[in-house]
Image (cartoon, rainbow, N blue to C red):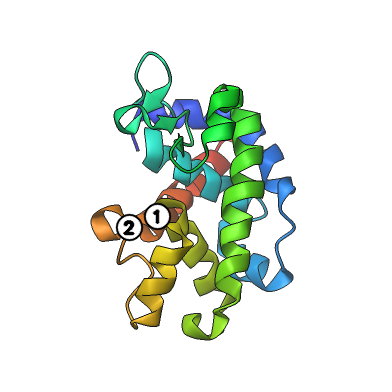
Amino acid sequence: MQANELKLARQYRPIFNEAQRLIQWPPEVAAAMSDLGPDWFAYVLMGIASRESRMGLALDKNGLGDKGHGHGIMQVDDRSHSSFCASGNWRDLGASLEYVCNYVIYPFYNYLANHFDLLNNDYGNLFWASIAAYNCGPGGVYKAVRKGLHWDTYTTNYDYSTDIMYRAVELAEKLSEIA
């Protein structure tokens, strides 16, 4: 992670820490993520922001990416979330995180929970598959695991959730050094 990206992660950390309280994860998920510490979900959200926009460094002057379709640091896509993007609320990181948690990540988790057996009845797998769905949609993840493939199979560069996991670990290490 670049120094300027890490500086932004430190700056935005309180907003990500607040956002982690938006979802009450089942204890089994929290236990699976315990290696990242108590702020594990904040680190995962920061990992997504890092992958999607380099904490905003990869955005154009209007705060857009993905050829104008990705909005803000979390790159909320106007093709799937037109009302939210049209509202302009994506410009506020807290509002964007609230939207992403309540209308993207947790619904994807619930959708994939209906196919828990395909994820070996493992809550860690379910969580990371939900993160992969942030990139390729829950249908893409379901299609992959139904075929016996890894949930990242249809994500960009075939490594979305794996990359987010590595970024979250790096952020947990570097940001806990200064906490």
Crowdedness of circle 1 by 10 Å Cα count: few (<14), some, many (20+)?
Answer: few
Q: Say how many tags the image has.
A: 2
Q: Which residue is mark 1?
A: 166
Instruction: Please indicate, yes or no, whether residue 11 appears anywhere in the rendered image.
Output: no
| Amino acid at pointer 2 | Thr
Q: Residue at x 67, y 48 (%)?
A: 102
- In this rendering, the answer to whether 34 lies above or below 85 is below
Q: Residue at x 75, y 58 (%)?
A: 24
Q: Position of residue 38 (x, y in %)?
A: 67, 54
- In this rendering, the answer to whether 168 lies above or below 11 is below
Q: Position of residue 177 (x, y in %)?
A: 54, 41
Q: Position of residue 113 (x, y in %)?
A: 60, 73
Q: CA distance from mark 1 to mark 2?
A: 16 Å
First reached walking from the N terminus: tag 1 or tag 2: 2
Q: Tag 2's secondary structure?
A: loop
Q: Which mark is residue 128?
A: none
Q: Where, quadrant-wise, is the C terminus in this rendering?
A: top right
Q: Nearer the viewer, residue 85 or 61?
A: 85
Q: Residue at x 55, y 66 (%)?
A: 127
Quadrant position of residue 136: bottom left
Q: Residue at x 73, y 47 (%)?
A: 21
Q: Tag 1's secondary structure?
A: helix
Q: Position of residue 118 (x, y in %)?
A: 48, 83
Going by the image, does 83 lie left or right of 23?
left
- In this rendering, the answer to whether 19 lies above or below 29 is above
Going by the image, does 160 lie left or right of 168?
left
Q: Nearer the viewer, residue 86 or 103?
A: 86
Q: Nearer the viewer, residue 133 or 28?
A: 133
Instruction: Please indicate, yes or no, whether residue 26 appears anywhere in the rendered image.
Output: yes
| Amino acid at pointer 1 | Tyr
Q: Which mark is residue 155?
A: 2
